[in-house]
Image (spheres, rainbow, N blue to C red):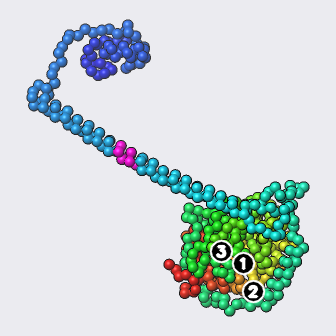
Amino acid sequence: MICSISGEVPEEPVVSKTSGLLFEKRLIQRHISDFGKCPVTGEPLTMDDLIPIKTGKVVKPRPVQAASIPGMLGMFQNEWDALVLSAFASEQQLHTTRQELSHCLYQHDSACRVIARLKKELDEARTMLAHLERQAPMPAATMTANTSALSNGKRAAEDDELGPDGKKIRPGISATIITELADCNAALSQQRKRRQVPPTLAPLDDVKGYTQLNSYPLHKTNKAGILSIDIHQSKDIIATGGVDTNAVVFNRSSGEILSTLSGHSKKVNSVKFVADAELVVTGSADKTVRVWQGSENGNYDCRQVLKDHTAEVQAVTVHATNNYFVTASLDNSWCFYDLSSGLCLAQVEDSSASDGYTSAAFHPDGLILGTGTSGSVVKIWDVKSQANVARFDGHVGAVNAVSFSENGYFLATAAQDGVKLWDLRKLRNFRTISPYDENTPTQSVEFDHSGSYLAIGGSDIRVYQVASVKNEWNLIKTLPDLSGTGKINSVRFGPDAKYIAVGSMDRNLRLFGLPGEDGPMES
């Protein structure tokens, strides 16, 4: 007989009146006190329902293994084997625990190293910020106390007067400035009438043979992408604006970085040289514009921080006088600045539309400004009156780039649907170039300085030969996107179109040209 709970022979057996099952007395008593029912049938059960059974005291027989010496030796051997196996399992568990502990210590050490590196970078960033804040803007004779008041590179907001509509009152473009712009326009127009293609311009056959000459990693890898490029035509130095919040000034001849312009807190959307001065102007997604002054040691220091926009600054363009520049923003306004003082002379908002500006460029003569909007519209402005004098519709998607030809009457605009060419004399679209499919926008378009070639950037780089309104514009060269990102953000021609600078969504500035031309050889 065995207990229905333990399965062992009971020492004090009892039997249930209701079910007839046999139990060990101490076990069934504890179960009844806890649950009050039979552990097998689940029926109610009390101590009164248990009947004790009397049994004789019988000595348990010795196991068969213990009845002889060989049997006992076998039992001891089994016990020893079990002990050895238990010790082996313990050693394995100890080894696993040691490995886990070692891994945890390695992770802790790595975390400490990362924290130390981040603290170092934070300290460096704070030091750089303090250095930038200590830099005072360059004094200008034209600045007055009630118009600008610049300190530590930042305009004092308390000096900005507000009009009845709550907007800042701008001094406007004075008659003196308008005269200066008109004189510049007249001089350049006369030069353009006598303009001829320079004999040093890269010939058509050379452009057809262009290939990658070199690739320079100018920006950070963790925030890759070059969004804007500009080339100083007389000095042959290149400026790039990146997603990593920096702008870089690069010497193509030596292949060295001259200066890294750090100060913006978000990506740099546009970068421009001022041709006659050691100045660079940058516009950023942090809503600010910065003017950088070159020094004798080759570095560029922040001279001014301009905070007149309330949204991303998408484009910067410098006037032909090199005394003024315009910024265009997603806040649906463009600002006309005096370069020497950093004063916003005029901020123009188009009340007829709510689309922000995504691109802007001065006409080579300087009295016309072209802007592209996020609403697919190209607008032409008279700079003297700040009036919208023409409007070009027809694009699909945001107008990512605008470029005037040096001949003075061609305008190229780039958007989702490709490039449209406009005749400014008749204010009409005379040709559309659709180099890519509908899902691939054209990010960049650029005439070379002579007006002989047109470069387009999208999923690759395409160079066209500029022709007349009626003649076909022939594709003369297609250059691949060697970044592998499928997005060319900026394309610029070097002096005399001897090379093409390309920025895409990786960190590298790529130069395409004819192998063997002057410049650093490919490494």
Residue 392 versus residue 363: which sits nearer the camera? 363
Residue 13 sits in which quadrant? top left
Q: Categorize mark 2 by other alpha carbons within 10 Å: few (<14), some (14-19), many (20+).
A: few
Specify the segment rendered in magenta: 97-103
Q: CA distance from mark 2 to mark 3?
A: 45 Å
94 left or right of 450?
left
**Which residue sits at x=11%, y=25%?**
67
**Which residue sits at x=10%, y=31%?**
70
Residue 143 sits in which quadrant? bottom right
Residue 493 versus residue 248: which sits nearer the camera? 248
- Check disc 1 and report its element: helix, strand or loop: loop
Q: Categorize mark 1 by other alpha carbons within 10 Å: few (<14), some (14-19), many (20+).
A: some
Q: Nearer the viewer, mark 2 or mark 3?
A: 3
- Check disc 3 and report its element: helix, strand or loop: loop
Give the residue at mark 1.
Answer: 275
Residue 290 position, x and y percent, is 71, 65
Q: Earlier in the sequence, mark 2 or mark 3?
A: 3
Residue 318 sits in which quadrant? bottom right
Amino acid at the residue labelled 3? Glu
Give the residue at mark 3.
Answer: 296
201 in relation to 41, above or below: below
Q: CA distance from mark 1 to mark 3?
A: 17 Å
Residue 329 versus residue 325: which sits nearer the camera? 325
Residue 300 position, x and y percent, is 66, 70
Amino acid at the residue labelled 2? Ser
Does the image show residue 19? no
Q: Which dot marks residue 468?
A: 2
Residue 312 position, x and y percent, is 72, 61
